[in-house]
Image (cartoon, helix red, strand yellow):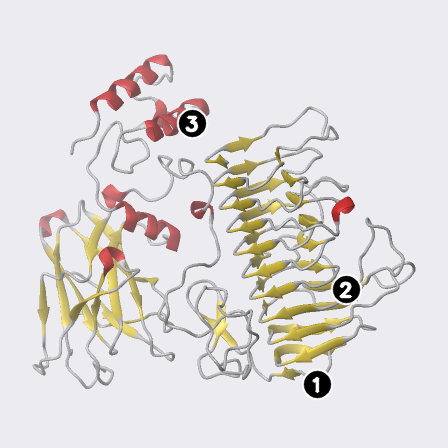
Amino acid sequence: MLRDCAIIDYNPTNRGTRYFWVSLYGTNNTVENCRFENQDHSGVTVVVWGDWPNFHTIRNNHFVDRPVGGENGWETIRIGTSDFVFDSSQTLVESNLFQRTDGEIEAISNKTGENVYRNNTFRECSATLTLRHGFSATVDGNFFFGEGAGGSGGIRVIGPGHRVFNNYFEGLLGRTGGIIALEAGESDGANSGYEPMTDVICANNTFVDNADPAFALNRGFGGSRDVAPSGVLLFGNAISQPNENVAIESNANITWQDNYAFADGLGTASSNGVTILGSDPLSDSGDGLQRPTPGGPLENAIVSPLAFVAIDMDGQPRGTPAEAGADEISTDPSDRGPLDPEDVGPSWWNNTPNEGPDPALAVFIEAESPTSILDPDNDGDVYESETVSGASMDAVLTAPAGSRTDLSSDPHDTIAVYSITPPATGDYTLYVRARGFSGSSDSFFAPAEFDTDPDINDSTSNNGLFRWETGATISYSAAQGEVELRIGRREGGTQIDAIILYPLNNLTEGELDFLLNAGPVEPCDADINVDGAANFFDTIAYLRLFDAGDPAADLSGNGDINAFDVFRHINDLEAGCPE
């Protein structure tokens, strides 16, 4: 097992010198929670060799900054070679983040059979996930975000038996003429050629604002590539690309069924099995993704969903009937989604000082523990604490049921009051982690100032997923002492999980989650990574500062960074942190 390691800038002088950073032999090996950064030479970053099958696992790794190589052999992951196209590897590649892995067109090169690629995220990658050789690959629940990268692509499909489903593609600028490219095969090709495509299903994928049509149906047809894809089913896909056609190229035996498209036109897609929509069936969910609009044409559009598409891109069970596209409208807990750098890589990598918000500057409030609860309309219906899995401290504050409170004509129904004392004079932005379930709209009232009743309508998610809402920036003076923060019910069933006040107004979801998990901590000189403990990980974090010449490494405060500062760190570490 290779775990919690980082390989960075390990490059020969000559970019053409070819070697591999990690080679997997034998069986049942695992590469997990590693970081591979700036491999700038020929050779694959992580490669799987025979014997077959080998049952390897590559997961939770961060692959970042693989510069363009200009030729073949610059893949980030390759499983097998063209000599073994008929062998089964059964390697699992899951929950990895690929950022700017631009070495060549194939960020991932599949060259053996029965491999699984699931829950991976591709950001700013001028490359594709390519099923180059082999058979019966599973490509499930991956996220592809172009994020402005030229040549950013989706998936290339070659050969028989593949299943491509639950994948989400957004903002890709195009690499292969279609976001999912179904490649033409060869009737008499070598192992290194193009195996004809048969028995392939692309189902329940979502396409959002990409610069290529959703599908290229017969890419590369001509000359020796004389076999068009056949026995291909395109089922239940959701396309929101008003400036692009559904498909390009033809001469392929394709069956279209239950697909929905807000697009410029069909292109070469069949009108039998593709419904062209007059308006966008997706809407902003507040979590950075475009999801089916509740009550819209994608909801319950699939009367008979495919059995192997049992869950959606979030890991939520699909119903019957089911939604078209990668996302099921659901209030069930989500256990997967797009990955960010803090989600992957070595456990010690993200525990670095001076990165992200400082917990010492924040005010933390567990919403289920108010100082008091008010009932202004005296109807007896007030906020209640409720145990909820997935919430901070496993509990939330739930608004009572009933019709919506409209302050223009109604008094407040119920208000939760929190008595707090911010750490310093200044402006604090209100962040509230909340969720709703109605499928239309959910909301609560947030305050514009301390010590006043809330009157700002703040919307939440409506699909049962927690998300952070950003409220007003509220001024505080130390002369005020203890103040009250008040949250009011607007719509029934809305749940408030946690509240953070912080001096910046642009914190990301990841930064807020970091603060929530960190919680208030006591200052400790030895706790370099601010995780509440003094241990080996703090030494790693300190040495990174020291090597970089960061002023924070000057523990003595004399303006020089030298061995005396290292000794100071060791002494601080031995003293530990207060219990």
Kindly identify which numbered label has been placed on residue 197: 2
Q: Identify whether 139 is placed above or below 284.
A: above
Q: Are marks 1 and 3 in contact (CB under 8 Å)?
A: no
Residue 323 image point, x, y percent: 51, 77
| Farthest residue, direction top | 563
| Farthest residue, direction right | 223
Q: Secondary structure at mark 3?
A: helix
- The residue depicted at 36 percent of the width and 36 percent of the height is 354
Identify which residue, 513 or 7, lies in the foreground.
7
Identify which residue, 190 or 244, lies in the foreground.
190
Q: Secondary structure at mark 1?
A: loop
- The residue depicted at 26 percent of the width and 27 percent of the height is 526
Q: Based on the displayed image, in which of its 4 quarters is residue 183 positioned? A: bottom right
Label 3: how many Cα within 10 Å (few below 14, some 14–19, many 20+): some
The label nearer to you, 2 versus 1, is 2
Q: Identify whether 466 is placed above or below 253.
A: above
Which badge, 1 or 3, is on the more N-terminal residue? 1
Residue 87 image point, x, y percent: 71, 50
Q: Which residue bears the numbered disc 3?
A: 544
The label nearer to you, 2 versus 3, is 2
The C terminus, quarter of image: top left
Residue 221 image point, x, y percent: 85, 64
| Residue 556 appearing in the image | no
CA separation in Å, label 2 and label 3: 50 Å
- Inspect the image, locate mark 2, and give the three-letter code of the amino acid beneath it: Met
| Residue 335 appearing in the image | yes
Q: Are marks 2 and 1 in contact (CB under 8 Å)?
A: no
